C-alpha cells in the first residue's frame, strides 16, 4: 500500500507516515508530534495528512520552516517536470522499431534489385571471361550495389536523427 497519494484533481498530496510529512514540510517528526497537540493543527484523515493543510497551519502559526516545506514541494515538482521534459526529449533520439524494420526491408529490396539488374547487365560479359576476371567483375558489381545503399532515402532519415542527437546532446 502506498504511504502517500495524490487525490482527485485539485486536491493536495496526502501522506500517511509522519516521517514523510516531516520531510515534505521541512521539520522534524518531534515538531509534528508536539504540534499535533495543538487544537487547531490539521487532523490526520483516513488517507493521511493533507500536506497543504499542514504547511498552511505552519505558516499561520509562525513556524520558521513553513517556507522551506513549500519551497521543497515546489522544488520536487520542478525537478519532476524537468525529468519529464528530459524523458520526452530522449524518446525522440531513438528510432522506432517499425521504422527500422521498414528501412531494412527497403534496403534488402534495393540491394536485391541492384544485384539482379547487374546480373542481367553483365551476364554475357562474365560468361566469356576467365574465372579470375569474372570474379573481379562480379565483385565490382556487388560493390556498386552496396554503394547504392548509402545513397537511398533511409540514409537521409537516419542522418536527420543523428544530427538531432548531436544537437540535443550539445544543448
Image (tube, grey):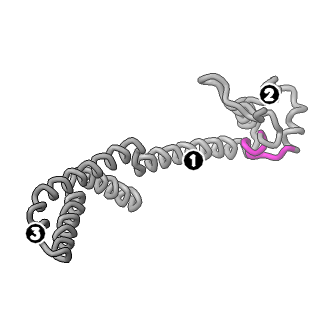
Q: Position of residue 169 (x, y in %)?
A: 41, 60
Residue beneath disc 2: 42
Q: Of discs 2 and 3, which sits in the foreground?
A: 3
Is residue 163 found left or right of 38 in the rendered image?
left
Residue beneath disc 1: 79
Q: How far apart are marks 2 and 3 (CA)?
A: 97 Å
Answer few, some or many: residues within 10 Å of disc 1's Cα (few below 14, many 20 plus, some between 14 and 19).
few
Q: Which mark is residue 170?
A: none
Residue beneath disc 3: 128
In the image, residue 56 sits, relative to residue 93, either above or below, namely above
Answer few, some or many: residues within 10 Å of disc 3's Cα (few below 14, many 20 plus, some between 14 and 19).
few
Q: Where is residue 27 in the image (x, y as percent from the top left)?
A: 78, 46
Q: Where is residue 134 in the image (x, y as percent from the top left)?
A: 17, 71
Secondary structure under the numbered disc 1 in the rendered image = helix
Q: Which of marks 3 and 1 is nearer the N terminus?
A: 1
Which quadrant: the C terminus? bottom left
Secondary structure under the numbered disc 2 in the rendered image = loop
Task: Name the residue located 81 percent from the left edge and 23 percent from the top edge.
Answer: 46
Amino acid at each position: 500500500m502506498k504511504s502517500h497519494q495524490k487525490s482527485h484533481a485539485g486536491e493536495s498530496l496526502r501522506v500517511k507516515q509522519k516521517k514523510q510529512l516531516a520531510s515534505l514540510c521541512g521539520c522534524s517528526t518531534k515538531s509534528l508530534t508536539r504540534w499535533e497537540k495543538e487544537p487547531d493543527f490539521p487532523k490526520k484523515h483516513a488517507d493521511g495528512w493533507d500536506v497543504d493543510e499542514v504547511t498552511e497551519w505552519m505558516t499561520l502559526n509562525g513556524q520558521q520552516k513553513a517556507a522551506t516545506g513549500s519551497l521543497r514541494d515546489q522544488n520536487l515538482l520542478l525537478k519532476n517536470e524537468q525529468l519529464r521534459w528530459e524523458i520526452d526529449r530522449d524518446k525522440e533520439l531513438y528510432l522506432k522499431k517499425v521504422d527500422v524494420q521498414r528501412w531494412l526491408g527497403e534496403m534488402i529490396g534495393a540491394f536485391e534489385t541492384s544485384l539482379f539488374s547487374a546480373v542481367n547487365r553483365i551476364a554475357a560479359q562474365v560468361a566469356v571471361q576467365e574465372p579470375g576476371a569474372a570474379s573481379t567483375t562480379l565483385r565490382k558489381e556487388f560493390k556498386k550495389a552496396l554503394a547504392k545503399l548509402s545513397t537511398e532515402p533511409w540514409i537521409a532519415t537516419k542522418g536527420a536523427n543523428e544530427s538531432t542527437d548531436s544537437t540535443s546532446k550539445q544543448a
